[in-house]
Amino acid sequence: MKTLRSYIAGNWHEASEGFATLVDPSTEEPVARCSTAGVDFGAAVAWAREQGGPALRALTFAQRGQLLRAMSGALREGRNELLELSRINNGTTMRDGNFDVGGGSGTLGFYAGVARGLGDRSVLVDGDGVQLTRDESFWGQHVLVPRHGVAVLINAFNFPVWGFAEKAACALAAGMPMIVKPATATALVAERAVEMVIEAGILPPGALQLLCGRTGDLLDRLGPQDVLAFTGSADTARIFRTHAHLVGVNVRLNVEADSLNAAVLGPDVAEDTATMGLFLKDVAREMTQKTGQKCTAVRRILVPVEQLARVREQLIERLTKVVTGNPADESVGMGPLATAAQLEDAITGTAELTAEAAAVFGAGGRVEGVGSPTGKGYSFGPTLLEATDAHDVDAIHRREVFAPLATLLPYDGSAVEAAEIVAMGGGTLVNSVYSDDQAWLGSYLAGAANTTGRIYLGSESSAGAAPGSGVALPQTMHGGPGRAGGGEELGGAAGMRLYMQRLALQGSRVMVDAVAGNSD
Ligand code: NAP
């Protein structure tokens, strides 16, 4: 069994005790073990601050773009190996694995372009300058500069490559060194992805370090110039938000947490239209892709009461075709849940939801996976629930079941009611809405736009090109208010802000422009 290593202060560190065991979720066979026992967390922080930071800050945006391009290429070259590791550690099908692996290299590639576009400069100009007195002898300009600290990137188990890459892309473009900490359960994939980048000799010393296992006393060593970028559950986010040291020294924290995303069908959408086809296709995919283990998965499906029976029937028809089991078997279209703990949590969560909504397809429990040894594996069948009253339920709007499960919720077809029901989720990452009625959409947005980080408009005019609501494209912002964490990531150059200090430069226009790099 492979022992995963951490990469600290320029050396690979292999622990000799305190191991967590990683398993293949299709077979429950152990595949690796990892621990950070013996890691010198102080040395990691110092190495980043003293070596990586200065080296990255000495580069222009365009030069950092070259590093990102090379990182993207290293992951692309290693794609097949990473997909295989993803299968045996995450239980992903090729397609689901590529959503993570290809998404990671694609995001790095995108930010290579963003950084290149920012050019041969190292100060990021933010908006236009402004005249502050009667003439240009006193001028103001907002700019962003890299923070002189380390970015600690803590990721969730479901995106071991994309999770690392989307944060690393923005931190590196901004000029901050990183300590990457993947979730232990799926660190086999993340460890190899980081190792590929390090082996390729792309980055200056100190720019990228890796922790496979617990964080030890790392968080207590962070300071006011450091950043903690976290993706994971709301419960873990709470630990960081209330961590005495992090709060005391004001470490910048970004949280990408969980979300009960909603898909809303507008009342105008008739059967056999392109918009209805998109809605059904998107919802079925967003329920089952990556076995429902996506922060952007659809959990609540709002349907006008008159259309409910037909939508239920058509979704069931699609879910029936999903073959669940071991992705090593070619017939399998949906792998297992990633860990025993996830399976247990999904079963407990389903019990909470079925106290409020009836199962109309699937039973929300462990199933024998095709191609898995009998009695083994964490396969969970696709499950569709239905509530009779969307207002008179609580857990449906509160309890995330991180599995291929969603609940149909009837509503009266009015934009106002749909927005009210969606808001009961307490803030989401994405809200998909399917309608060709612009006036209805306008009313819906007036009530619902404040409750989410992204609204995906599904319509006849987007049906041919829309990639699905679950894709966090690097061009647009990822994050959401309230229980979704309140964070913001990606969104082009805006994604770099987390790792930079924004300040106002004031002085004569000549001097401000010269310092901001605006004069050439
Ligand atoms: P998790 O249990 O919160 O863990 C996330 C990360 O935090 C892991 O790397 C974990 O390390 C680490 N961690 C946990 N406790 C810690 C502590 N006390 N100190 C330092 N690090 C700690 O979440 P998960 O189960 O991996 O991921 C599933 C959740 O993530 C779901 O709720 C999902 O909605 C959410 N998610 C959100 C997004 C988004 O972009 N908004 C994306 C993906 C997933 P260990 O593994 O070593 O415990």
Image (cartoon, rainbow, N blue to C red):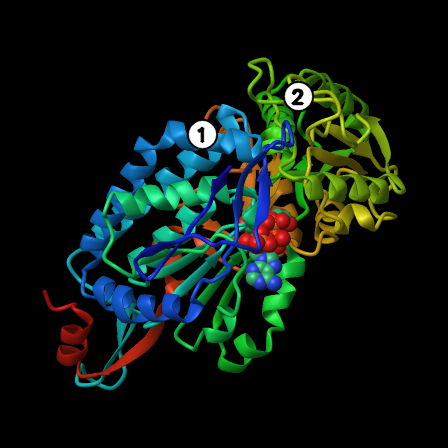
The answer to whether 98 is drawn above or below residue 439 in the figure is: above
The answer to whether 105 is drawn above or below residue 171 in the figure is: above
Q: Front-most of 13 and 384? A: 13
Residue 368: which quarter of the image?
Answer: top right
The answer to whether 437 is drawn above or below residue 5 in the figure is: above
Identify the element where label 2 is drawn: loop
x 76%, y 41%: residue: 344
All told, the count of numbered labels is 2
Residue 482 in sight: no
| Residue under numbered circle 2 | 372
Farthest front residue?
Answer: 16
Q: Are marks 1 and 2 in contact (CB under 8 Å)?
A: no
Identify the element where label 1 is drawn: helix
Tell me residue 322's x, y (percent).
66, 19
Tell me residue 317's x, y (percent).
72, 16
- Of the residues tagged 1 and 2, which is closer to the observer? 2
Q: Is residue 513 left or right of residue 141?
A: left
Name the residue type under label 1.
Answer: Leu
Which quadrant does the C terminus fall into?
A: bottom left
| Residue under numbered circle 1 | 83
Q: Front-most of 249 and 503? A: 249
Tell me residue 108's x, y (percent).
34, 44
Name the residue type under label 2.
Answer: Ser
Residue 51: which quarter of the image?
Answer: bottom left
The answer to whether 41 is drawn above or below residue 131 in the figure is: above
Residue 56 in sight: yes
Q: Front-most of 374 and 505? A: 374
Q: Front-most of 145 and 1? A: 1
Residue 7: which quarter of the image?
Answer: bottom left
